[in-house]
Image (cartoon, rainbow, N blue to C red):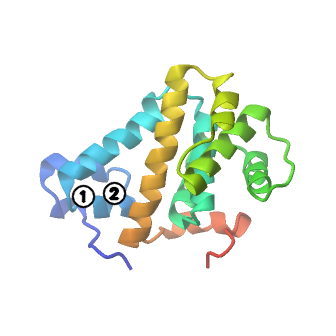
Amino acid sequence: MARLPYLEAEQVAPEYRDMLKRNTNLHKLLVNSPDMARAFNGVGSYIRFKSKLDPRLRELAILQVGWLEKSEYEFTHHVKIGKEFGVTDADIEGLIAETDGKPSKLEPLAKAILKGAREMVRELAMSDATFAEIKQQLSDEHMTDLVLTIAFYCAVVRVLATMQIDNEPYYKEVLQQYPIPGVK
């Protein structure tokens, strides 16, 4: 049960109702502080719709954060979002294998991005070696977008956990195919 109320459109000033278009519990809770919610949504929207980073690689990085942090909400939402941007079941299986230190059929850049996300979650920062490996294939703009995307979703999973935001039933079906170890 969430620590703050989920607000419906009629409970929010008209100028903020656009933030509830996605109708997710995250957005319904964040609109308790509508100006902060707008800023938060701005970063998320930039990442999803305006970043020039390859969307499949972006979603793999986000999924890695959700998986490592055992964030049912983040992981399940981004499995569905990721599939809209080219993430396949084989990619997700590769992510799980890479996380477990097992070989996968993912291409080297995807493997390096997943490793970089794991390092940022576990060690705070991406190592010099991993950064350099990824940088061989990405521009400075793409590297900036990648690091900020991983960092933003590290924050998102902490918001979800601290606010105890409930996952919507529609997304829970993802856990049947990809159960997160340690998550009930």
Residue 80 visible, this orientation: no
- Asked whether the beta carbons under mark 2 and mark 1 sit within 8 Å of each other, the answer is yes
| In the rendered image, the vertical position of residue 144 relative to residue 162, given as above or below | above
As rendered, which of 123 and 171 lies closer to the eye?
A: 123
Q: Amino acid at mark 1?
A: Val
Spot occupied by residue 13 in the image (x, y as percentages of width and height): 12, 54
Quadrant of the snapshot with the C terminus: bottom right
Residue that numbered label 2 is attached to: 27
Q: Outermost residue, top direction? A: 139
Spot occupied by residue 95 in the image (x, y as percentages of width and height): 73, 51
As rendered, which of 63 and 20 lies closer to the eye?
A: 63
As rendered, which of 13 and 122 lies closer to the eye?
A: 122
Identify the secondary structure beneath mark 1.
Answer: loop
Residue visible at 47% across and 67% down? 168
Q: Amino acid at mark 2?
A: His
Identify the secondary structure beneath mark 2.
Answer: helix
Residue visible at 32% across and 47% down? 40
In the figure, is residue 27 to the left or right of 121? Answer: left
Residue that numbered label 1 is attached to: 31
| In the rendered image, the vertical position of residue 184 relative to residue 142, given as above or below | below
